[in-house]
Structures are given as C-alpha cells and as structure tokens.
Image (tube, grey):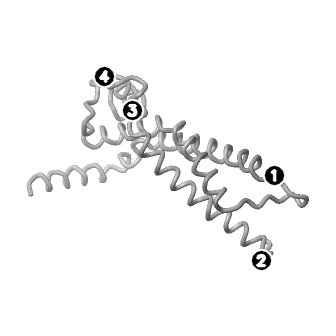
Amino acid sequence: VRASSDRNARLWNMLSRPRSLYTGHCMNMAREGVFTAIYLGLYSRVRDQVIPNDETGQNAMPLHYAALVSAFTGSLAWCACYPFDSIKSVQQAAADFGTTKGLQLASSGPKSTIRGAARSLYAQGGVPAFYRGLAASSIRAALVTSSRMFAYEGVLQLQSNYSLGY
C-alpha cells in the first residue's frame, strides 16, 4: 500500500507541473513527421506501381492490396523513425522516475534532454540500442497502418461507387 501511495504522489507531482506533460514532445513530433512523410510517400509510389491509372485517371486498389502495401510501407517507415521513439521513451522515463526498467541510464547530462537521452542509449549498446524492441513495434505498425489504409481505400471506393461527390 505504501509503494502505491508513493507512486501516486510522484505521478501527482509530475502532472501538477504542466511542462512535464510535454517531455519528449519534440522527439514525438519528429517521429510523426518522418513516419508520415515516408509512409504516405512510399504508399503512394507503390500504389501507383501496383495499380496503374485507368483511362479516367482513377486507380481503384483492391482492399487486400491496400492492406498489404500499407503494412509493408508502414513497417518500413516505422523502422526509419524508431530511434526517435526510443529517445522519446528514455526522456519520458528519466523525467518520471530517473531510470527505466532493465536500462541503467548513463550519468552524463540530464536524461530528459534529447542529447542526454541519446547519449544514454548509445552508452548502453551503441546504435543497436536505438532499435531495441523494433520487431514487436513494427508488427504493431503494420497492423495499424494496414487497417487505416484498408478503411481509407474502402471509403474511396464507396464514394466512387455511389457518386457522393465529396
């Protein structure tokens, strides 16, 4: 019970400082920007290669193709931006508790900064440390992106079938 109340007190103290809510925000924005640019850029290019335009300039992609292409491009994009996520996670963990489970943070520099978090990761295992957990996370990215584009392409097809004109 004591450990639980200590944890709750630390959480309350963290949340009562508005700035703490933004720990890792810069890395999160960088991750999302890189991910979106790579994901949608690759998806568009692969989509155009798989399903060329017809005489009207339209190219309706079968939904199972959309799911497969999106899973592939989403996983590739996630691999490219995963180091941003690793740094963000270390920043947030260090800001909250000072350490992360199973990862002893290096003592040089504050770990809540981008530079400090990156140095911590690098000290724990070099470049591969930035990619710990990539396999499971890439599977999640494939599932999320494939369901997203499956829905998007499905709505586009419904729109064109029913001439909703949006």
User: Which residue has dot 1 on it?
Assistant: 52
Depth check: 85 or 125 in front? 125
User: Which residue has dot 4 on it?
Assistant: 108
Dot placed on the residue nearer the N-terminal end, 4 or 1: 1
Q: Quadrant of residue 128?
A: top left
Question: Quarter of the image containing the N terminus?
Answer: bottom left
| Residue furthest to the right | 55
Which mark, by number, is residue 113?
A: 3
Residues at circles 4 and 1 in contact by the CB criterion of under 8 Å: no
Name the front one of labels 4 and 2.
Answer: 2
> In x, y percent, where is residue 110?
32, 29
Distance of label 4 from label 2 (alpha carbons): 61 Å
| Residue furthest to the left | 2
Residue type at numbered disc 1: Pro
Dot placed on the residue nearer the N-terminal end, 3 or 4: 4
Q: Residue at x 57, y 41 (%)?
A: 76
Left/right placement of residue 86 relative to residue 58 reads left
Which mark, by number, is residue 162?
A: 2
Residue type at numbered disc 2: Tyr
Crowding at label 1, few (<14), some or many (≥20) Cα neighbours within 10 Å? few
Crowding at label 2, few (<14), some or many (≥20) Cα neighbours within 10 Å? few
Name the front one of labels 3 and 2.
Answer: 2
- When the figure is inspected, residue 132 is found, relative to residue 13, above or below; the finding is above
- When the figure is inspected, residue 83 is found, relative to residue 166, above or below; the finding is above
Q: Quadrant of residue 32?
A: top right
Residue type at numbered disc 4: Ser
